[in-house]
Image: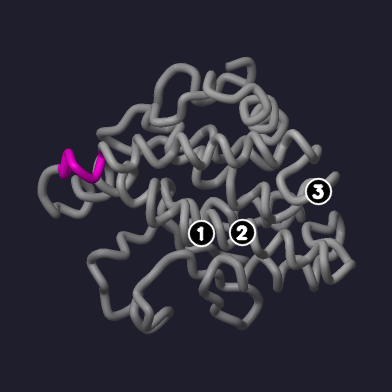
Amino acid sequence: MTRLFHLPLSPFCRKVRLTLAEKKIEVELIEEKFWEQSPDFLRRNPAGKVPILKYENRLMSESQAICEYLDEIHPNPPLLPRAPADRYEVRRICSWFDDKFHHEVTSNLLYERVNKKLSGQGYPESRNIKTGAQKIKYHLDYMGWLLDQRRWLAGDVMTLADFAAASHLSCLDYISDVDWNRNANVKDWYAKIKSRPSFRALLADQVPGFPPPSHYADLDF
């Protein structure tokens, strides 16, 4: 059985979950409180991070590497284009969200509001929350600009770039930190990806102590 050691509101874990679901790979989800850094966990990944995928006899870490591996051995449906320039654009946008967006927005909103409480690290820092709330506007505007020119974030077909972006935004939407009225292109894009069968499990997530807003699982939000 394929197993994914994950945290429900981890955008990196969600990207892997979306890829697995899109490829129709059955997986057992095992929630991992990575901040406890248990010996078993560190043996699975000395870096002390999730996601960790147990696939066949291999333990795999780092979400982008996992997703690209799965796309290579399960090529249908393809999530990376064939043309080198198109693959570059997908990887660039994945990096944008997993690096820049994560640093400026996800860590300042999701981690302050949720992860600190879950891991017992104290109270949210209001200055960081204000920073994240300001920075997300820029990122939504950039997404809107991309979607003015393309059907999906990296081109005319859905790719891992869309999964990377949707994973971060879905986590933030769980805590009502996305202004979907800021850009109609972004809202339409998210409605498309949110309606996919691969997204259903994410919309069913429940984190104790943090109930999602009513619109979170609503496809007609």
Residue at x-position 28% and y-position 80%:
39
**Residue 83 left/right relative to 123:** right
Above or below, 114 relative to 45: above
Residue 46, placed above or below residue 7: below
Q: Amino acid at mark 2?
A: Cys
**Colour theme:** one colour
**Position in image of residue 25 (x %, y %):** 72, 58
Residue 126 is inside the magenta segment: yes
SS class of the residue under badge 2?
A: helix
Q: Nearer the viewer, mark 3 or mark 1?
A: 3
Q: Which stretch appears magenta?
A: 124-129
Q: Residue at x 59, y 41 (%)?
A: 142
- Of pointers 3 and 2, the one earlier in the residue sequence: 2
Separation of disc 1 and disc 2 at Cα?
6 Å
Viewer-nearest residue: 88 or 118: 88
Mark 1, residue position: 98
Q: Amino acid at mark 3?
A: Gly
Give, as a three-letter code, the residue at label 1: Asp
Instruction: State if disc 2 and disc 1 touch (CB < 8 Å).
Output: yes
Determine the residue positioned at 39% across, 31% down: 177
Other-residue count near label 1 (Cα within 10 Å), few / some / many at <14 / 14–19 / ≥20:
many
Residue to which mark 3 is pinned: 155
Rendered image: mark on residue 189: none
Residue identifier under label 2: 94
* Quarter of the rendering occupied by the C terminus: top right
Q: Quadrant of residue 76?
A: bottom right
Mark 3 or mark 1, earlier in chain: 1
Residue 63, compared with residue 153, is above or below; it is below
